[in-house]
Structure formats: structure tokens, C-alpha cells
Image (spheres, helix red, strand yellow):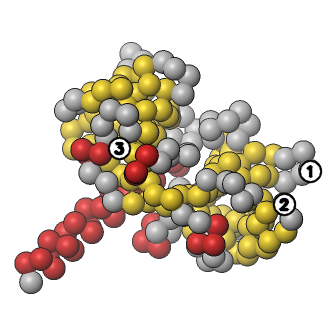
Amino acid sequence: MHSFKTFKFAALTFATALATLSASQAALAAEGVRVRGTVASVTADTLVVKSRDGDNVTVKLNAGWKAGGIAKAKLADIKPGDFVGIASLPTAAGGDGALEVLIFPPAMRGTGEGSYGWDLKPNSTMTNGAVSEAVQSVEGTTVNVVYHGQSKKIVIAPTTPIVTFAPAVNADVKPGAAVFVPADRADDGKLSTGRVVVGKDGLVPPM
């Protein structure tokens, strides 16, 4: 009985941490800072990330901060009815092509729903919504993502990174680990966060 209670508590803690992590997508869509790179150093309250631009970025870790993990998934894992977050870019042929896909667990359905500007690449957008259909073609698999009564068709190529959330502990955020950090910028320019997304088994968070 004790082990079952322990498992339930761990599952609840993990789900709460994931909800906080993914909710930051919507909260920081219009403003805020997203730090991507590898951990250069970490202490109890300070994270230094070597960004993709090669600069060291210092982020204050708020009290009670939590880590969330990212694990690989497959195109076959995306089914009609699933709730996903897809970063995409307009294509020369029209429509959008996916840069990455995040499959949300069922308990997190509706998180960050909408389509808004994203800074993974210039002119990219993030679309969080439910997959109404998935059609295969020579270009890849085209999914129709529905959000707030609107819809967007996005082509997912076979090489597109596809991930889902996975359990992680704060100790996984260590030098050399690849991370994605949604941060707040204070008036003095300093960054802070209460959540860090870390790649599991060497995976780079593609968001």
C-alpha cells in the first residue's frame, strides 16, 4: 500500500511539473525569453547555458524550480484526436512545414492552445491543438490541427524531430545536458525561471 501511495504522489508531482512547463509556451508566446543550448554550469540557484549562438546565458533558478524531460517519439505515435504542439515555417509550395512536433500526454490536453509567433527560426509559429486528421503523401504526413474553432494544415516530413514529455529530476540538469528554458526578463535585464526542459539520453529539446 505504501509503494502505491508513493507512486501516486510521484505521478501527481510529475504531471504538475509538466503542466507548468508546457503552460509557459502560451504565457511566453508574446513576450519573454526562450533559452536554448547546453548546460555550462549549474548551482542551487543559478543556471548558465551555452546558447546556440555560442554565448553564455545566466538564468536565476527560482525557489522550487522543476525539471521536465523530453523523450523521442515517432510519426506513427501521432493519431487523430491527439493534442500536439508543432513549430512550423511557411513552405515555398504553400502551407506550413513542421520544424518539430511535441505530443502532449492526455492529461495535458488543451495546454497553450492556439497559434502564435515562435522564435525557433525566423518567421516560425507554434500551433497547439488537436489533430483532426492525418493524411500521408509523398511530401510526408499532413496533419490538420484544430484550435479555438480554427485549423491549420502542417506537413510533417519523415526527418522532423518528434518528442513527448518524460519524467526528469533536477539532477538531470547538469553540465553538457541539452536544455530549453522559458525565462522571464526583469526590468534590469536579468533572467529567471521556475522550469527547465532537459533532453533525456542526449536528446536535444527541439522546441
In front of the other: label 1 or label 3?
A: 1
Separation (CA) of disc 1 from disc 3: 38 Å
Q: Tell me the residue that label 3 is attached to.
A: 195
In screen coordinates, is 64 left or right of 33? left
First in residue order: circle 1 vs circle 2 = 1
Real-space Cα separation, disc 1 to disc 2, in angstroms: 11 Å
Q: Farthest residue to the right: give it.
A: 93
Q: Residue type at mark 2?
A: Glu
Total numbered circles:
3
Residue 93, image x, y percentages:
92, 50
Image mark for residue 93? 1
Q: Are marks 1 and 2 in contact (CB under 8 Å)?
A: yes
Q: Nearer the viewer, mark 2 or mark 3?
A: 2
Is residue 146 positioned above or below 98 on the image? below
Residue farthest to the front, as pictured: 201
Query: Real-space Cα distance between discs 2 and 3?
Result: 36 Å
Q: Secondary structure at mark 3?
A: strand
The answer to whether one can see residue 113 in this image is: no
Q: Amino acid at mark 1?
A: Ala
* Mark with earlier residue (1, 3): 1
Residue 122 on image: x %, y %: 71, 33
Left or right side of 84 for 42: left
